[in-house]
Amino acid sequence: MTPVFEALNSLEAHLVKIRLIGEGIDARVGGDYLQGAMGELPAMGFLEVWVEDRDASRARAIIARMNEPAEDNDLIP
């Protein structure tokens, strides 16, 4: 397995994971339980989304599209 995304928090990691699963890519979040060990400090660098090696480039492309700004016609009035 290969890490394809480093998340700032658990919510962000799981949103990416859910999106990848929705696209047919088996994804897992690693380091989720390490946040509790940090106490009140932000757990930076621990949360990663992992996919199978064969899906890594496709997953990175999907994540890149997720981070693109929405166009005007994508907004709900």
Image (cartoon, rainbow, N blue to C red):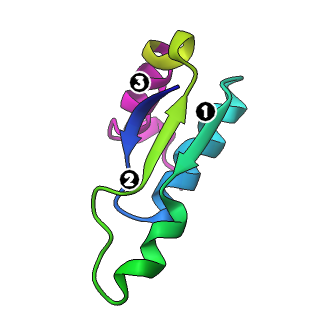
The image's mark for residue 7 is 2
Residue positioned 39% across, 39% down in the render: 5
The mark nearer the N terminus, 2 or 3, is 2
Q: CA distance from mark 1 to mark 2?
A: 14 Å
- Residue that protrudes farthest toward the bottom in the picture: 40
Assess whether mark 3 and mark 2 are in contact (beta carbons under 8 angstroms): no
* Residue 10 image position (x, y, % from top left): 50, 64
Left/right placement of residue 69 relative to residue 10 reads left
Q: Secondary structure at mark 1?
A: helix
* Residue 11 image position (x, y, % from top left): 52, 64
Q: Amino acid at mark 3?
A: Arg
Which region is colored magenta? 58-77
Q: CA distance from mark 2 to mark 3?
A: 13 Å
Which residue corresponds to mark 3? 60
The verdict on residue 55 being magenta is no
The verdict on residue 65 being magenta is yes
Q: Residues within 10 Å of mark 1 (few under 14, many from 20)?
A: many
Q: Secondary structure at mark 2?
A: loop
Q: CA distance from mark 3 to mark 1?
A: 10 Å
Q: Secondary structure at mark 3?
A: helix
Which residue corresponds to mark 1? 20
Overall secondary structure of the magenta section: helix
Left/right placement of residue 53 relative to residue 27 reads left
Q: Is residue 62 above or below residue 8?
A: above
* Residue 67 image position (x, y, % from top left): 35, 39
Task: Determine the image quadrant of residue 35.
Answer: bottom left
